[in-house]
């Protein structure tokens, strides 16, 4: 399970790729039913050369300590150098001492479990509609018919400027009813925390690119983001399928919090490398926008 906050504009969201299947007979992804069968449906079985790699080496990712960072010039310089190197190599780094309480992070995971533990019919009340980037999606059964991911997601929008988007609290209450107010409250708070963390990271990215510290902070101040809860249900044949297939984030920045289960891998120099879960850290992944900028420098 993972909770990821993606700074983006809705237009940048992952669009359906062409040619990956037909949408005529969508399969229903209900893992508790599918796990009663002896095998998983073919649609979820990935080709041999794309099956999960286990026993992969760990990726060397810098750990950036944010405590007092931006007020201490020499640590700031060191951190921006480390970030610059990591961004040129693979685009991943970890941040610790980020100021987000353990309680809030644990609540975010707890409400993720509560949501995905609900019966399918309940979750489908907030079903992601074709062409939209928010809502509940169970695998991609309605969009593709092969190489389906063994996962469920719930995505919703966050924007600091309430005149451009409804609050997270209103999203939950309007879509699912007043009983979901506690979900909305936790995720509203979590998104606000992620939004301010993303602006701190923007400062570091600015420094690592040799521009003014405020340069990207100001640009992204009224950022538009998508919060995504990723849930990877147990699977009877985990070696045949993938939770999330290989992809790039076509966005600006992703801030991910992993649960204790290993699984996140990054393709670097023709090899998959893992990023071990660290409950105290957020995994930061620069999206394509910053990848291109770093490679140009
Ligand atoms: O859930 C994860 O650990 C990673 C998910 C991911 O890469 C994504 O949502 O873009």
Image: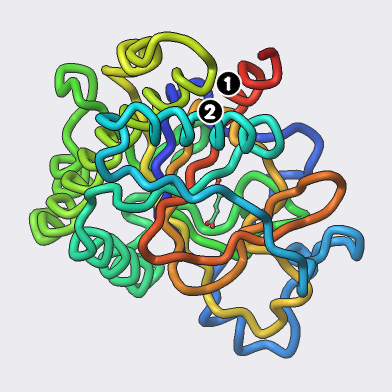
Coloring scheme of the render? rainbow
Residue 276 place in picture, x, y as percent? 57, 66
Residue 57 horizontal side relative to residue 74, left or right: right
Q: Quadrant of the C terminus?
A: top right
Q: Residue at x 45, y 61 (%)?
A: 258
Please say if the residues under marks 1 and 2 sit with CB atoms less than 8 Å apart. yes
Q: Say which of 295 and 248 sits in front.
A: 295
Q: Secondary structure at mark 2?
A: loop
Residue 175 horizontal side relative to residue 48, left or right: left
Q: Residue at x 36, y 15 (%)?
A: 213
Among all residues in the image, which is located at the extreme right? Answer: 49
Mark closer to the chain start, 1 or 2: 2
Residue 30, visible in the rendered structure:
yes
Q: Residue at x 39, y 39 (%)?
A: 134
Residue 83 versus residue 181 in the image, above or below: above
Residue 51 place in picture, x, y as percent? 82, 65
Q: Say which of 189 and 274 sits in front.
A: 274
Residue 69 sits in which quadrant?
A: top left
Query: Marks 1 and 2: which is nearer the front?
Result: 1
Label for residue 122?
Answer: none
Pointer 1: what residue?
A: 289
Pointer 2: what residue?
A: 251
Cα distance, mark 1 to mark 2?
Answer: 6 Å
Residue 214 place in picture, x, y as percent? 33, 13
Q: Say which of 293 and 123 sits in front.
A: 293
Residue 61 versus residue 54 in the image, above or below: above
Among all residues in the image, which is located at the extreme front? Answer: 74
- Other-residue count near label 1 (Cα within 10 Å), few / some / many at <14 / 14–19 / ≥20: some
Ligand 1 lies under 8 Å from the Cβ of mark 2: no
């Amino acid at each position: 399970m993972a909770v990821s906050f993606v700074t983006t504009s809705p237009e940048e969201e992952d669009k359906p790729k062409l040619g990956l299947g037909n949408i005529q007979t969508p399969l229903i992804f209900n893992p508790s039913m599918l796990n009663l069968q002896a095998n998983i449906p073919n649609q979820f079985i990935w080709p041999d050369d794309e099956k999960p790699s286990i026993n992969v080496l760990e990726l060397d990712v810098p750990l950036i300590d944010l405590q007092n960072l931006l007020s201490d010039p020499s640590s700031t310089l060191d951190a921006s150098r480390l970030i610059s190197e990591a961004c040129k190599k693979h685009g991943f780094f970890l941040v610790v001492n980020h100021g987000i309480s353990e309680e809030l992070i644990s609540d975010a995971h707890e409400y993720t479990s509560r949501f995905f533990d609900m019966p399918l019919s309940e979750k489908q009340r907030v079903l992601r509609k074709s062409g939209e980037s928010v809502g509940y999606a169970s695998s991609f059964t309605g969009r593709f018919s092969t190489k389906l991911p063994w996962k469920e997601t719930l995505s919703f929008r966050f924007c600091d400027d309430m005149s451009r988007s409804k609050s997270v609290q209103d999203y939950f209450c309007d879509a699912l009813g007043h009983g979901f107010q506690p979900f909305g409250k936790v995720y509203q708070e979590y998104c606000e925390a992620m939004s301010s963390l993303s602006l701190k990271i923007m400062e570091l990215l600015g420094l690592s690119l040799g521009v003014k510290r405020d340069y990207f902070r100001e640009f992204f101040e009224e950022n538009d983001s998508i919060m995504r809860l990723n849930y990877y249900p147990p699977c009877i044949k985990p070696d045949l399928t993938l939770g999330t297939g290989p992809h790039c984030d076509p966005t600006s920045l992703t801030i991910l919090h992993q649960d204790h289960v290993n699984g996140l891998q990054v393709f670097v120099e023709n090899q998959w490398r893992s990023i071990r879960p660290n409950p105290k850290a957020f995994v930061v992944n620069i999206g394509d926008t910053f990848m291109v900028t770093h490679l140009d420098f």
